[in-house]
Amino acid sequence: MPSSAAAPRKEVDRRRHRRVGTRLDACLDGGGQLVPCVIVDVSSGGAQVLAELPADIDRVRLDIEAFGTFECRVVWATDTRAGLEFLEDPQSTTARLAELLAGA
C-alpha cells in the first residue's frame, strides 16, 4: 500500500563557487546611495550581505576596504539581506579576494 506522505526532497546545492563564511564590514554604493553592510559569506561569484537596500537598486559597487571595489548585480534582496553577483570574471575575483577566500 503506497504511503500518502511524500518522501522528503534532498536539497541540491547548485552554487558554482565554494562559499566562505565571514563577518567583514563593507559599504555598498548604489547610484550614489551609500549603504553600510556586513559581508556574511563570499565566493568567487558573489557575496551575501546584511544591508537594508532601497528597493529600486539592482546594481551596486561593493567596497571592501582591504580588497577594493567590485561591480555587482543584486540577485535577491529582503529587508535585511541581499545576494550579490560579482560582474567581473570569477578568476579575477578569486585573485583579488585570495586571502579572504582562503579563510584567512
Image: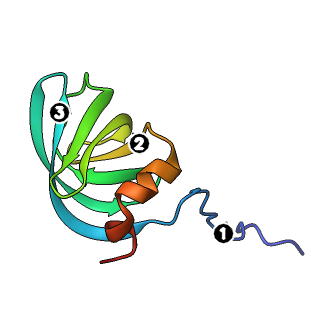
List the residue tagged with mark 1: 10
Q: Is residue 49 left or right of residue 26?
A: right
Determine the CA span between mark 2 and mark 1: 28 Å
Work out whether residue 87 or residue 48 is closer to the camera in this orientation and state it. Answer: 87
Q: Which residue is mark 3?
A: 29
Residue at the right extreme? 1
Residue 81 in picture, x, y percent from top left? 26, 49
Expressed as whole percent of the image width and height from the top left, the position of residue 8 reads 66, 70
- Is there a contact, CB below 8 Å, between mark 2 and mark 1? no
Name the N-terminal-most of marks 1 and 3: 1
Viewer-closest of 36 and 3:
36
Residue 46: mark in rendering: none
**Which quarter of the rendering shows the N terminus?**
bottom right
Q: Quadrant of residue 95?
A: bottom left
Picture layout, residue 104 above or below residue 63: below
Q: CA distance from mark 3 to mark 2?
A: 14 Å
Sequence-first tag of 3 and 2: 3
Q: Which residue is denoted by mark 2 in the rendering? A: 86
Is the Cβ of the residue at disc 3 closer than 8 Å to that at disc 2?
A: no
Q: Earlier in the sequence, mark 2 or mark 1?
A: 1
Going by the numbered disc 3, the residue's amino acid type is Asp
Residue at the location (33% across, 62% down)? Answer: 41
Q: Where's residue 102, x and y in %?
A: 39, 74
Rounded to the nearest angstrom, the CA distance separating label 1 from label 3 is 37 Å
Q: Secondary structure at mark 1?
A: loop
